[in-house]
Every structure is written in structure tokens, then in C-alpha cells.
Amino acid sequence: MPITHDTSFLDRMPQNVAIQFLDRVAASGPREAFRFPRGEAWESVTWAQAGEEVRRLAAGLLSLGLAPEQRVGIASSTRYEWILADLAVMCAAGATTTVYPSTGDEDTAFILGDSECRFVFAEDATQLEKIQSHQAELPVLDKVICFDGSLADGESVLSMDGLAELGDAYLAEHPDAIEAVSKEIRPDQLATLIYTSGTTGRPKGVRTLHRAWVFEGEAIKAQGILSEDDLQFLWLPMAHSFGKVLLSTQLACGFATAIDGRVDKIVENLGIVKPTFMGAAPRIFEKAHARIVTMQAAEGGAKEKIFLKAFEVGTKVDQLKREGKSVPLLLKLQHRLFDKLVFSKVRERFGGRVRFFISGSAALNAEIAQWFHAAGILILEGYGMTENAAGATVNHPDEYKIGTVGMPFPGTEVRIGEGGEVQLKGPHLMAGYHNRDEATAEAMTPDGWLRTGDKGELDDDGFLRITGRIKELFKTSGGKYIAPPAIEAKFKAICPYVSQFMVFGAERNFVVALITVDPDAIAGWAAENDMADASYTDIVRSEKTRAMIGDYVDQLNSQLNRWETIKKWELLDHDLTIESGELTPSLKVKRAVVETNNKDLIDAFYG
């Protein structure tokens, strides 16, 4: 089925997220809506059951006096209760303020204070302590509702059950309260405040309206990508717009979602849940690729030879098919054999039922996408940002180009502005930054388009290709422009042991790199090289490790222009983490933080 550009759905969209959810409950009541772990088992709830829980919690918020557009924070990892809280806030006409569980005390206090949250849902004792330790800075805060009911005190801290009981009493007096409130929520009413994790200064709160989330879900539904027969596995941080847009898509399409935010459980959960699709950041695909490649290398012998030959054949077949050419009979027979011996086992690692993955939040390396595609796993890269409710373009299962981020959503406009900047327009644009009028003005063009800060180009078929962040491009002292993301992506495709590869050299006479290795990927290699019990630091300081990484750097340099080549590099003694502040919760590198933290090392390269 070809991709549709029909925008007639714009005239039929639900008025707001509350109505979108209530309509879904009415239409799909007995079907499975959510699945989540309880101990070692998975528990399932229907749309009707989820609808009842949301109604009770929303009524509880109304009983506490929540007014339209008043903010309610959620400080939690991704879990079923997060979704219940978010939907309850919007069904009560409030606006959710999202807080990553990894956000520090001061930034948590800033976000809750800047957004003037009246209530906050807190996951556990850690999140509650962050809030209570800064209570004096939160004069508007009335109550905290804890997912962990044992922390409730019945007064300033309620449990989810306690809030629901308040809702029961409210609904006994006002049985149609939620339906009545939902009808009064305007499309241009505030639904969410998402604070972007900036690399410098305070985060900015993006004001996202009801119409933006409704549009996102309905635009994806209109393309026929997903249906209520699909099963999503959701691990992405719900405090991030990528996670939120997948919830909007679920409300529009009606599929079930299995939820578990534990990143270290992703591969295990895929085997258990057996989803038909999943959204993820590129780092997840890089790690999966590295894990599979290094495992086969460790096997060695005939198994490794079969594996390598399989991907050689798979890549040839894939390329011929994408070019619209016929596959020779011998190659076709070889491919059929390798599909049984190798590719089917790769697919089984992801549950065996995946129709496609969706990649977003950062650039996906095209070579890694092609590697997965050769194994029969399609990764559809999309594009967007928090300021446009996450989704602006996406590849379609029946119409895609690897290396691009797809075509615009129906109802979304994309243009290439001055300096090659990608600019967006549509119903999903933010209403601005909260309390930041000057920053809002800077983010928009005079004629109302969103400046993305990304450099890109549209091909003749309308597919968008992102070529880098404008601010990340730098010029050497010799006047040559360097695009770090392109170089970094090449290295990640070459070296299965790398975690991060960061290029620097602005206004310098040559380019350098800081490198971290993946602890999981390097462990097997280290064991084979007499370092089975060595620490991470000892491994990266080993001459064997340096020689191995150096060989990969040489391979990279052979593919680069002379002025782009890495002249000097160093292995860091730690991998980047969210906790260290060097990665965002969506696993993007905070380049400025890394550069600041390693300023002396970088300067020494040029000494």
C-alpha cells in the first residue's frame, strides 16, 4: 500500500487527548490495551479497565481542585502507572510536566517550580526525597501522589489508591464529570510541558497543545503504518517526546503496548513479549549490532565464516532488490539457505515477529540500518524534535529509503531554509517555551516556521536527509568544514567495540577524537586477550586494546578526506552515562559537557 498524503483526517480529529482516549476505550473496550511486569510475570489490562482507572484518578485530581491547564508533574521511569497518571491529568483538563527520574535535585526543583506544578506523581522514595528536600522552592505544590503506596502519609503524600478513592467519592456525586470536563478542553489548550535537556544553562519547557498530540497519532494512523492488531514494546523514557508520541499513536490506532522502562531488559523482554514493532534510539541498534557481531567473532571457525558469508550474500540481495533489479538464481538459493541458518536466528533474538523498528531522537547510521535490513529487519528512521511533538517525517514500510528520515507526515510542511536549515510547519508545533518569550522568538521564523537547527536536504521524491546539526559543524584553522556526526557514525559502523566516538577540532589545525568502548562488547574480546578479570579502566589502558582501536581508526581514516582524518585520539577511562551528565536520557551525547570535562586532554593533543 503506497504512502498516503491525504489530509482529510485533519477535519475529523478528536478535539483533545481526553476525548481521543475516551473514544478509544469505547471502541476497543474488551481488547488488550497494556501489558506490564509484576514481579516475574506479565499482567494485562483491557482498554475498559484502563479507562476505569484513568477516570477514577482524573476524578481524584478534580476533587483536589485541579483547574484547567494547571500543571501536574510526573517524576518516574517508564511504567504503566506513568501512563495512567498522564492520561488522568489530561482527562481532568490539567497539563503534565515531565521529569526524568535521572534528573538531579536542583533541576527537578527548577522544573517543578518554573512550571508551577500544583501536584506531582512520584515513583519512589528517591523521587519523593528530591521534591521534599526543595519544598521551600515550590510554594504552589499542594500534594505528592506516590506510585509506591507505602510512602503515603494521608496528608501531603497520597498513594495512587488514595487518589482513586477520592475519585470514587467525587464520581458518586458527579457521575459524568470526566466526560463533561473533556468536552470543554480546547484543541489549543496546554497538554504537556516537556523540559528539553540542554547542554548548557537551564532546560527550556516546551509548551505542547492537545491538538499537537492528537495530530501526531492521527497522522500516523492515516498512513496505514499500524493497526489495532499490532503489539508495541515500549521502553523509551515517557518524559521524552518520542515516548509520548508513541502513546498518542496507540490511542489513535488501538494496538496494545507492553511496557517496561528497564533498558538492560530490552533484549530479554523482546524475546518474551514478541512485539510487532518498537521505537528506539540509534544507540540501542548500535549495541544490538555490536553484540551479535562480537558474539560471532568469539565463536570463530566455521560458524563465523558462515555468518560473514551470510551477510555478504544478504547485502548483495538487498541492494539488488532496492535497486529494482532481479536476483540471480544462485544468489537467491544461497540467500534462502543463509536465511534459515543465520538471519532467522537474528530475527528470533528480537522476538521473531517484528515488522519494523522505528528509530528516532538521533541520526541512525545507514550502514547499520543496511546490516539489519540484510537480515530481514526493517528499521524505519523518522525525524522530529520536542518542539514539534516528536514526529515530522518518517519512512513507510512500503516506501522507504535507508539513509533518509522519510517523507513528511500528511499535514506537515518541510522546507529547507537559509544555510540549508530544515524548517517545519504544521498543527504539531509548540506554543512556545514556557516563560521564555525571547527564546520562543529565536526558535521561529518571521513567517511562522520552526527553526530546527538541523542541516538537511529534500530529494526529488520528497524524502528528507539530515546532514548534521548546524551548531555541530565546525571549521578547522585551515578553513575546512567538518561534520562530526558523519565521521562518528562511520566509526560506529566499522568498530563493534565502540560505545562513543566524539570528534573535535574547531579552529584547530587538525581533527582529534575521544573514544569510549562498550563494556558489554569489549568483555568477550578482553577475555580472549588475557584480560578476563581486568577492570574497564585496565582494559582501555592496555596496549592490546589501543592497538586494536588504532587499527579501526586507520580503517576510518582510509574512508575520509585528508582534512577530516583523525590525527590523534584517546580512550577515556569510563563510558559516558546519563548519571554523569554526559548523555541525555534519550542517549544523545552532550558534546559540550564532554568537551568541557576533557578540556585539558583535548588541549594536550595540540601541545
Image (cartoon, helix red, strand yellow):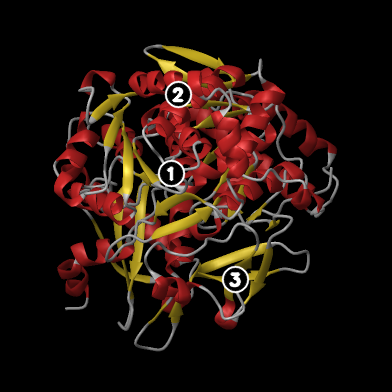
Q: Residues within 10 Å of mark 2 (few under 14, many from 20)?
A: many
258 vs 334, nearest the viewer: 258
The residue that disc 1 covers is 67
Task: Please report whichever mark, 2 or 3, sits nearer to the chain's N-terminal start.
Answer: 2
* Cβ atoms at labels 2 and 3 below 8 Å apart: no
User: How far apart are labels 2 and 1 at the CA level?
Assistant: 15 Å
SS at mark 3 in the image: strand
At mark 1, the secondary structure is: loop
The circle on residue 508 is none
Circle on res. 423: 3
Callout 3 amino acid: Gln
Q: Position of residue 256 (x, y in %)?
A: 61, 25
Residue type, numbered disc 1? Ala
In the image, residue 480 sits, relative to residue 374, either above or below, namely: below
Give 132 or 68, whichever is nearer the viewer: 68
Instruction: Give the distance between the C-alpha atoms of the residues marked 2 and 3, in whole angstroms.
Output: 46 Å
Q: Residue at x 65, y 40 (%)?
A: 378
> In percent of the image, x 22 and y 34: which residue is there?
128
Which part of the image, by quadrant, shows the N terminus?
top right
| Residue identified by numbered label 2 | 170
Q: Position of residue 43 (x, y in %)?
A: 48, 13
Asked if the residue at tag 3 contacts the one at tag 1, i.e. Cβ–Cβ closer than 8 Å, the answer is no
User: In this rendering, would 328 be left or right of 304?
Assistant: right
Quarter of image, res 383: bottom right
How many residues crowd mark 1 within 10 Å: few (<14), some (14–19), many (20+)? some
Residue 277 x, y percent position in the rendering: 61, 33
